[in-house]
Image: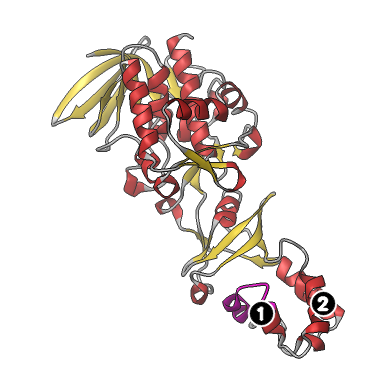
Amino acid sequence: MNVETLIIGAGAAGMMCAAHAGPDVLIVDHAKAPGEKIRISGGGRCNFTNLHTSPQNFISQNKHFCKSALGRYTQWDFIDLVDQYGIAWHEKTLGQLFCDTTAKDIIAMLRAEMDKAGAQLWLQTDVGEISHDGTAFTVALTREGRTRSVKTRNLVVACGGKSIPKMGATGLGYQIAAQFGLPVITPRPGLVPLTFSDEKFKPLAGVAAPARVCAGNANFDEAILFTHRGLSGPAVLQASSYWHEGETISVNLIPTGTLLSDLQGQRQSDGRKALTTVLSQHLPARLVEHLKDELPLAGNIADQSDAKLTALCKSLSDWTLTPAGSEGYRTAEVTLGGVDTGALSSKTMEAKHLTGLYVIGECVDVTGWLGGYNFQWAWSSGWAAGRAIAGS
C-alpha cells in the first residue's frame, strides 16, 4: 500500500497536520478513539488555547525555535476555526479558553477538517518496523490482526511524549527519532505535582491557598493545593517544569505583600486575639496550625513587636522547601525535552538531514506553560508541517 503522507499519532498535532497536509494522507493511532488527551483535558472541556500565547510561554533549549510556527498559525487563527464550527467557548483566568460544553466538540471539528481534506484514519493500529530506502519510508502497520507494509514519501511523527501512560503514551516518537539520527533532549515530566518523602503535608490534604511559587529562574502567582503526597495546584504545576531533582522551591504564602500592614493594624484593633487566630483570617486555619511547628506563633497579636511581625512575614514570603521528587509521568500533563530543535526546520518541522521526516507537537523539545499553550503548539506545529507537505 502506498500513501503520500503517513502520520503516526491521532492527537492534537497529528489531526491538525492531517487536515492541512494535502491529498492521500493516512493517520494512525493505537488508541480506540482519536484525540484522547483532548477529550480529558480541561476537566472535559478542553483548554484549547490561550489569548496571551507568545514564545515566552514555552520552554526549550532553543527559545527562538517556536516563533515561526506560533507566528504563522496563531491563537486567533484557531479561535476563528472554532467559531466557524459554532463551538461556544469562554475565557477563564489568565486568558485560558475552554469549550462551554465538551472537549468532544474540538475532536469532532478536527475530524470534520480531516474528512474535508480526505485523510484516512486507522485506529487500534500498531506501528512496527520502519525503514527508509533513500527515497521513501516503509512502515509495518498491524490492524485487525493483519500486518501490512505502507510505503510513504512523508512520515510525520506526532505520537506525543511519555506523560500519562494510562492514556497510551509510550515514547515511540523518541525511538523513531533516534533510529533516524535525530538527537533527543532527555525527557522528564512537566506540569506535575511535587512530592515529599516525609508526608509532611498529609494532614493538610485538600487545603488550597493563593501563593507565588519560585523554581529555577521562574515564578508563578496562582493557587497551590496541598495533597497527601505533597504539593499541587496551578502555581506548583507551572513551577515544576523549571524544577530539577535535588533543588529547592520557594513558596510565598503572602503574594499580595500587604500582610505586615494588615497585622500591624489588627494589633491595634484586635490586640487580645491570639496571633494564630488573626493569622487564620489571612491564611487557611489548617495551614496556620501546621506552621506552628515551624514558626513562632505563640501569644496574642498585641504582644508582637514590629520586628517579630516583620520576621514572621519574611518567613511566610520565603518558605523554602525541598521536594523529594514528582508524581512522574503518571500524572504529568506534558513531557519536557524531546527531539532536539537543532535537528528540525522551525518553518516546516522537517528533519534537516532527512527529507520527508517531520516531527511535531509534544515530541519536540518545546513545552508550554499550563493554560492552553501546549495545545496551541500542537495546532501551530501541526499546521506548519501540514502546509509544508502540501506545498502551500
- Mark 2 sits on what residue? 265
Badge 2, how many Cα within 10 Å: few under 14, some, many 20+? few
Q: Residue 248, relative to residue 290: is it above or below?
A: above
- Please indicate whether residue 371 sits to the left or right of residue 330 in the image: right
Q: Please name which of the two marks, 1 or 2, marks the residue nearer to the observer.
A: 2
Distance from disc 1 to disc 2, alpha carbons, whole Å, reads 24 Å
Give the colour scheme shown.
secondary structure
- Please indicate whether residue 144 sits to the left or right of residue 242 in the image: left
The disc labelled 1 sits on which kind of residue? Answer: Glu
The disc labelled 2 sits on which kind of residue? Answer: Gly
Q: Residue 300, relative to residue 108: is it above or below?
A: below
Residue range in magenta is 279-290
Q: Position of residue 48 (x, y in %)?
A: 48, 37
Q: Nearer the viewer, residue 216 or 292?
A: 292
Residue depicted at x 48% and y 39% = 89
Q: Quick one: quadrant of the N terminus? A: top left
- Asked whether residue 364 appears in the rendered view, the answer is no
Residue depicted at x 49% and y 17% = 353
Q: Locate residue 36: give its quadrant.
A: top left
Q: Residue 207, relative to residue 2: is it above or below?
A: below
- Mark 1 sits on what residue? 294
Q: Locate residue 167: give its quadrant.
A: top left
Q: Position of residue 182 (x, y in %)?
A: 48, 27
